[in-house]
Amino acid sequence: MSEKKSKNLAFVIMKRELSVYFTSPIAYIVTGLFLIISGIFFFSTFYLYNRAELRYFFTYLPLFLSFFIPALTMRVFAEEKRVGSIETLMTLPVTEVQVVTGKYLASFISSLILIAPTLFYIIPAEVFGTPDYGPIVGGYLGAIFLCASFTAIGIFATSLTKNQIIAFFTGFIICIVLTLIDTFMVFMPAQIVTFFTYLSANSHFNSIARGIIDTRDLIYFISLTALFFTLTVKIEQNSKN
């Protein structure tokens, strides 16, 4: 099979997943809840702190995405395994890498669509204040990397089970631990704190959100994404055997 055809199959799966996703109510429910909750936190800065800025929103964004991205991805493999359609898909001339790539890309795009409406938060921040666009650009850049990593984790979680609820909680637990792990270790010895701070997705996100583009942060998110993507491929290969 040619490399071009191989890529096309992954995109066919991606388009199929996006079509299924946006014709189901789960997309709109998850997106609606995310916008309501994130909107409350954003606009609370106007009244509680008298500040027209997005810093408070970005502070809590990793926590929001820890919950909502696993909710987006929980059905991707679990539902197909439950109804048995994954076996039909795997009998087609596609590889596990193509299947995982297609489903991952669809879920990643869905996660970006989830946060895209929050760009409108910039408008009231500009109208009622003088926002610093450096942290805003950094915050959204960090959000893209965070979405990429958490989507890979969510895809991994849903590949483990036929149960969507189990898939959601597995993905949520991994994401929330990676988000809060440096907070839990604050009273530990310095060497341990340094180690777990590097493992913290929140720490790397905050670094990028401050407008600091450090290769260590980029390597962290790329490695985390690659790790869980590879694990998902391995699981699908083992389930086929």
Image (tube, helix red, strand yellow):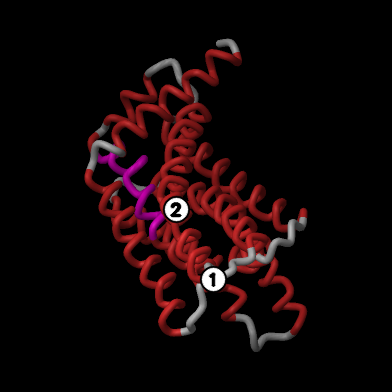
Q: Is residue 62 visible?
A: no
Q: Tell me the number on the disc at residue 115.
A: 2
Q: Amino acid at mark 1?
A: Gly
Question: In the image, which is nearer the foreground, mark 2 or mark 1?
Answer: 1
Q: Residue furthest top?
A: 1
Judge by depth and name the residue closer to the eye, 46 or 161.
46
Judge by depth and name the residue closer to the eye, 161 or 178.
178
Q: Quadrant of the C terminus?
A: top left
Q: Amino acid at mark 2?
A: Ile
Q: Residue at x 51, y 47 (%)?
A: 152
Q: Quadrant of the N terminus?
A: top right
Task: Provide residue 63's location: percent of width, then percent of height.
Answer: 47, 67
On screen, residue 225 versus residue 232, left or right, reads right
Looking at the image, is mark 2 or mark 1 earlier in the sequence? 2
Vertical side of 28 occupied by 173: above or below: below
Q: Residue at x 51, y 33 (%)?
A: 101
Q: Which residues are magenta?
A: 68-82
Vertical side of 240 occupied by 114: above or below: below
Q: CA distance from mark 2 to mark 1?
A: 22 Å
Task: Provide residue 203's location: percent of width, then percent of height.
Answer: 64, 68
- Crowding at dot 2, Cα within 10 Å, few <14 / some 14-19 / many 20+, comes out as some
- Indicate the secondary structure of the residue bearing disc 2: helix
- Crowding at dot 1, Cα within 10 Å, few <14 / some 14-19 / many 20+, comes out as some
Q: Residue at x 40, y 66 (%)?
A: 38
- Indicate the secondary structure of the residue bearing disc 1: loop
Task: Provide residue 115's location: percent of width, then percent of height.
Answer: 44, 53
Which residue is denoted by mark 1 in the rendering?
129
Q: Are marks 2 and 1 in contact (CB under 8 Å)?
A: no
Task: Provide residue 57's location: percent of width, then percent of height.
Answer: 49, 68
Q: Is residue 79 magenta?
A: yes
Q: Residue furthest front?
A: 127
On screen, residue 141 versus residue 101, left or right, reads right
